[in-house]
Image (spheres, rainbow, N blue to C red):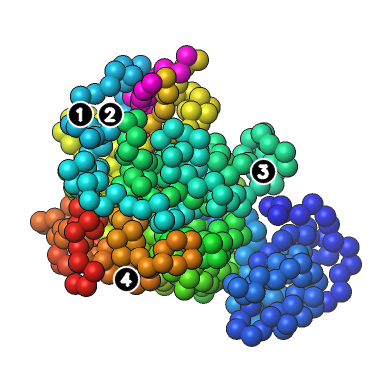
């Protein structure tokens, strides 16, 4: 659907919406059993019901702007309304690595027998025990386990993705948008008919990096993922620009449930509101209803997926924020441009999907094992921690190799001017590995986006070990997966003293960890462990 409609409304019957407002498409979430009354309210207030998604309880409607939303707020049949527009961004970024020509990365490194050529650069896998003499030897995962990557796409032809890529089940739920609603560049020119990319395409690179961390195979090339034998399914909900819209996110979760996907990775956060507040007096009625729409719609989709044995794993966020004590939001709404304003928020306002019910949320660690400086935290919000990279975690200057290395699409590397015309890396953030005439690219990135797929890979190991025959191949109740994730994690206490001061780029940034060893705001219930998942007993 379009970000905003291009039609203007003439005289409309009913409601108080402005007669000259633009038509826009909305997702109108109705209360239980109130679909017909919600449709009646839509029509009374000058809108048109276009379709219904009964599984998640919403009507796709077209109506005339914010006045239409405010009119709908008077109906007790309406639980929330969200415009079909940007709701999220990928939670990853390139580290502050040194510029200049990369080292001769085509010269393969000396590694131990059974290791992939770039294993020496994967400190993250060593931290978790995902090594040739660790979990790879006894619990590499099963092809029957379907891992959904809800992201910007997956390069299914990447040599270190293709052997595990399930093209048949993969789906693209987005249509590229060359320009935004005010004519500014958004996704860029369309590359395929109808602006619909194939299911094995990723212009951004974020989703491919995530997929690689979860399940790049052991094939004598590049890197290996946490669970190198599982099946990777692209459930694309993100635009080429790295931003997200609500309906594709709902569609991806619904499809995951219906297709028998076992676990999904969600490495993105929800906009246009940094914090979604159901009843913040600082917001207008239309804004309150929109935020309730995001909260309600995503929760219904997550509940539907979880009820169909889909384990849900999310990045916690990169805002350096104690999510249990948010006080101010100066960045929202961040769409359209110029709309942001300062507003007070509190703990009733949530980050979606990280703080949604039934979601396992993951903070990020640096190479030393400390919480990464950028990672959000909170004793109620952090469920687990995992390697996400931190270029400042070490002595001396920042170093890109302290972040996470995983597969990258060649096209994305060319578009970002990270490799030259001959395919040689131009930056230390990119590594090329070649074997038997096949070359592949790998990119260093940092973020809770990189932490979450480590946990997703461990979940896939557990489902491979303990899942029972089910739709799609195997199935395992998410509550059991969650319990075993916690049981197999390595407990990690808060630092001493509990307030840790990060020193980076001449700044001192204090962050306070609360809780005990069993669960705390920095590390949750512990650091995810592939080695632990390979040996944990089913009942503990």
Looking at marks 4 and 3 on the same chain, the residue that comes earlier in the sequence is marked by 3
Q: Is residue 165 left or right of residue 375?
A: right
| Residue under numbered circle 2 | 117
Closest to the camera, between mark 4 and mark 3, is 4
Q: Secondary structure at mark 3?
A: loop
Q: Is residue 487 left or right of residue 200?
A: left
Q: Is residue 374 left or right of residue 249?
A: left
Q: CA distance from mark 3 to mark 1?
A: 41 Å
Could you tell me if the residues under marks 4 and 1 are in contact, i.e. CB atoms within 8 Å?
Answer: no
Q: Residue at x 14, y 65 (%)?
A: 517
Looking at marks 2 and 1 on the same chain, the residue that comes earlier in the sequence is marked by 1
| Residue under numbered circle 3 | 196
Q: Position of residue 502 (x, y in %)?
A: 21, 45
Q: In the picture shown, does residue 462 fall above or below 32?
A: above
Q: CA distance from mark 2 to mark 1?
A: 6 Å
Q: In the picture shown, does residue 413 fall above or below 331?
A: above
Q: Please identify the quadrant where the N terminus is shown.
A: bottom right
């Amino acid at each position: 659907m379009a970000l905003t409609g291009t039609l203007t409304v003439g005289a409309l019957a009913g409601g108080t919406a402005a007669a000259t407002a633009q038509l826009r498409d909305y997702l109108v979430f109705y209360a239980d059993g109130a679909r017909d009354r919600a449709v009646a309210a839509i029509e009374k207030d000058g809108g048109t019901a276009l379709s219904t998604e009964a599984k998640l309880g919403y009507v796709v409607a077209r109506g005339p702007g914010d006045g239409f939303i405010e009119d709908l707020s008077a109906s007790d049949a309406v639980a929330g309304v969200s415009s079909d527009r940007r709701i999220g961004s990928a939670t990853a970024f390139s580290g502050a690595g040194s510029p200049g020509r990369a080292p001769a990365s085509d010269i393969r490194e000396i590694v131990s027998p059974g290791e992939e050529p770039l294993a020496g650069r994967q400190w993250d896998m060593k931290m978790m025990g995902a090594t040739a003499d660790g979990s790879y030897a006894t619990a590499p995962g099963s092809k029957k386990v379907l891992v959904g990557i809800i992201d910007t796409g997956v390069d299914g032809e990447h040599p270190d993705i293709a052997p595990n890529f399930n093209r048949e089940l993969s789906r693209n739920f987005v249509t590229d948008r060359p320009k935004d609603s005010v004519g500014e560049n958004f996704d860029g020119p369309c590359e395929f008919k109808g602006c619909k990319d194939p299911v094995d395409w990723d212009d951004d690179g974020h989703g491919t990096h995530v997929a690689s961390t979860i399940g790049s195979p052991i094939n004598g090339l590049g890197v290996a993922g946490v669970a190198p034998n599982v099946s990777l399914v692209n459930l694309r909900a993100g635009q080429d620009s790295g931003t997200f819209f609500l309906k594709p996110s709902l569609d991806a979760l619904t499809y995951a449930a219906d297709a028998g996907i076992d676990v999904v990775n969600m490495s993105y956060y929800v906009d246009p509101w940094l914090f979604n507040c159901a009843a913040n007096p600082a917001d207008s009625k239309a804004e309150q209803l929109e935020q309730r729409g995001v909260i309600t719609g995503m929760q219904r989709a997550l509940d539907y997926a979880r009820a169909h044995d889909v384990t849900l794993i999310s990045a916690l966020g990169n805002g350096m924020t104690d999510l249990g004590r948010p006080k101010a939001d100066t960045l929202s709404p961040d769409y359209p441009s110029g709309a942001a304003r300062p507003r007070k928020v509190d703990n009733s306002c949530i980050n979606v999907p990280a703080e949604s019910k039934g979601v396992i949320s993951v903070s990020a660690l640096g190479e030393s094992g400390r919480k990464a400086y950028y990672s959000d935290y909170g004793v109620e919000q952090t469920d687990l921690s995992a390697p996400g990279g931190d270029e400042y975690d070490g002595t001396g200057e920042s170093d890109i190799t302290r972040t996470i290395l995983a597969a990258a699409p060649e096209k994305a590397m060319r578009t970002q001017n990270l490799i030259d015309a001959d395919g040689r890396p131009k930056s230390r953030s990119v590594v090329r590995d070649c074997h038997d005439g096949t070359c592949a690219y790998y990119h260093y990135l940092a973020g809770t986006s990189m932490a979450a797929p480590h946990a997703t890979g461990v979940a896939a190991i557990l489902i491979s070990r303990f899942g029972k025959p089910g739709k799609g191949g195997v199935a395992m109740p998410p509550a059991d997966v969650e319990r075993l994730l916690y049981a197999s994690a390595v407990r990690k206490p808060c630092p001493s003293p509990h307030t840790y001061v990060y020193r980076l780029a001449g700044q001192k940034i204090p962050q306070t960890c609360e809780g005990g060893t069993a669960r705390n705001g920095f590390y949750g219930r512990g650091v995810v462990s592939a080695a632990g998942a390979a040996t944990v007993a089913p009942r503990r």
